[in-house]
Amino acid sequence: MKILSVVIPCYNSEAYMNKAISSALTGGDDVEVIIVNDGSTDRTKEIADEFEKRYPGIVKAVHKENGGHGDAVNTGLQLAQGLYFKVVDSDDWLGEEAFLKVLKVLKNSVKANASLDMLLTNFIYDKAGAHHKKVMKYNRALPKKRILGWDEKIKFGKSQYILMHSVIYRTELLRQCGLNLPKHTFYVDNIFVFKPLPYVEKIYYLDVNLYHYFIGREDQSVNEKVMISRLDQQIIVNKIMIDIFIQSNLENKRLYRYMFQYLDMMMCVSSVMSLLSGDERAAEQKEELWEYLREQDEELYKKLRKTFFGKMVNLRTKFGKRVSIASYRVVHKIFGFN
């Protein structure tokens, strides 16, 4: 029985995928590593096949037509045999000592029949050239080393979002919630985190720095210029998250508060990217996004417009737009998120 499935989506990743795969292999026989080659045109296929040959029973190389990051995750989820599920992007990697501690917690959970739904760890913004590596920690948001639910004292700060880098979900929970990420769309990692949350009952936080999130390649999806050029895809994801939030009919106050906060942040990112673009069509897309929210749920629209972010990104004057962009720059400098 495999404790954890580690899915590594790869697209033309020959220059850096070895590090990601090797870091996952430190889990030994407790782990299956599913390398999903998403229609690469470089040596990604050959490298994946080499790893499968060297590590039979642990590594599985899967080759498919290009469908984007989300479709690669979908493929990994369909094939996963591990009790838990983790996505590692091909330019990122896992810390060995932290990874072994994570596996120990998961194995103990299985032995105790505790059936954790979600395990959270810290992650490191491993920014190229940065001397100080920002660590996203959850130690002030969550009690440590025990199982808890949404009814307990969980309070995420404004910067403490659960990201794909920090989360491990129970595999069957992902299937039960109907997770199916859209093809050929960037930023779907937000959906990956967001959609399963209403199904989560048992949470465990392990205060270790597991995931190294590399930032620095010019073609990365989180590069500001790239994000602006892909505004349409950001907005697609944003609308899907609006639908998920509304359809979830959340009753738990703490879960509602967290998912509302996450949606608030996403509305802010989409809106600020449209302002940074300076393009007339981008400005129209921003207005269309907010109008979509209003049409789906008038009350939710009003609540989000009243938040700090909601007010900031909807200032109508030229000065107001400059204030919005300046605020974004300050947040960017503090947290270094792209």
Image (tube, helix red, strand yellow):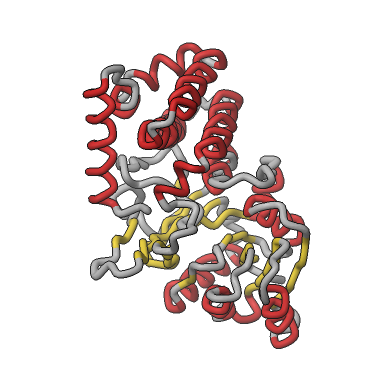
Identify which residue is drawn at 40% across, 48% down: 224
Quick check: 77 above or below 252?
Answer: below
Image position, residue 214 (x, y; %): 42, 65
Image side of residue 137 versus residue 172, left or right: left
Assign the N terminus to one quadrant of the image. Answer: bottom right
Image position, residue 148 (x, y; %): 45, 48
Image side of residue 14 versus residue 157, left or right: right
Question: In which quadrant of the rendered view does residue 296 lie?
Answer: top right
Image side of residue 191 versus residue 78, left or right: left
Q: Is residue 7 visible?
A: no
Identify which residue is drawn at 43% across, 31% down: 279
Compare residues 334 and 210 and report the one nearer the observer. 334
Image position, residue 120 (x, y; %): 45, 56
Question: In which quadrant of the rendered view does residue 37 lie?
Answer: bottom right
Compare residues 104 and 312 and report the one nearer the observer. 312
The residue lying furthest to the bottom in this view is 54
Count of all numbered marks drawn on residues in the image: 0
Identify which residue is drawn at 70% across, 68% down: 41
Q: Is residue 64 visible?
A: yes
Identify which residue is drawn at 35% across, 47% down: 160
Image position, residue 266 (x, y; %): 44, 35
